[in-house]
């Protein structure tokens, strides 16, 4: 676990498209642009990509981006414009970042859970039921 100074935040909105021209035997998959393609039938498919909320942190010469959206999506709910504004306005000056391992064995960085909870309270966001 390391302490990092926060630099900035970026919100990348999600995407949702209906496309046509897909083959009948095509399976659900991720395409080259990173969107998930789900078959709807008759040549149509839904392409989607979730929104992201990235926190840029640095310690000395080391600069890293950390995704904070999974916590807020799970605890608060959808990333509406109002919620994103409150989260960005109350960005802390420093955070503790820890390395975690996903279910599939991939390593990723995440902000300590207790600090994320304090950040949510500072933003005035309630937990979803």
Image (tube, rainbow, N blue to C red):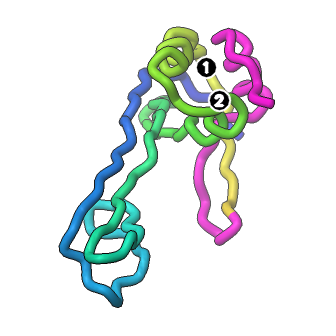
Horizontal side of 34 relative to 94 (left or right) equals: left
Q: CA distance from mark 1 to mark 2?
A: 7 Å
The x and y percentages for residue 123 are 64, 11
- Quarter-of-image position of residue 102: bottom right
Of all residues, the one furthest to the bottom in this rendering is 25
Give the magenta-colored segment's residue range. Answer: 103-129
User: Which residue in the structure is indicated by mark 2?
Assistant: 3
The x and y percentages for residue 27 are 41, 82
User: Which residue in the structure is indicated by mark 1?
Assistant: 94
Residue lying at 57% horizontally and 33% vertically, measured from the top left: 78
Vertical order, 110 against 28 (above or below) = above
Q: Is residue 106 magenta?
A: yes
**Foreground residue among 114 and 126:** 126
Of all residues, the one furthest to the front in this rendering is 42
Structural crowding at the residue carrying mark 2, measured as other residues with C-alpha within 10 Å and reported as few (<14), some (14–19) or many (≥20): some
The x and y percentages for residue 30 are 38, 69
Sequence-first tag of 1 and 2: 2
Residue lying at 45% horizontally and 47% vertically, measured from the top left: 50
Q: Is residue 110 magenta?
A: yes
- Quarter-of-image position of residue 126: top right
């Amino acid at each position: 676990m390391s302490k990092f100074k926060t630099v900035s935040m970026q919100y990348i909105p999600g995407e949702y498209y209906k496309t046509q021209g897909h083959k009948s035997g095509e399976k659900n998959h991720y395409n080259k642009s990173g969107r998930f393609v789900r078959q709807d039938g008759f040549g149509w498919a839904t392409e989607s990509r979730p929104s992201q909320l990235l926190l840029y942190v640095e310690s000395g010469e080391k600069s890293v981006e950390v995704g904070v959206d999974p916590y807020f999506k799970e605890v608060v709910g959808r990333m509406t414009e109002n919620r994103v504004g409150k989260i960005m306005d109350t960005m802390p000056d420093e955070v503790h970042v820890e390395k975690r391992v996903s279910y599939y064995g991939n390593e990723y960085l995440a902000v300590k859970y207790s600090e994320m909870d304090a950040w949510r309270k500072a933003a005035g966001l309630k937990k979803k039921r």
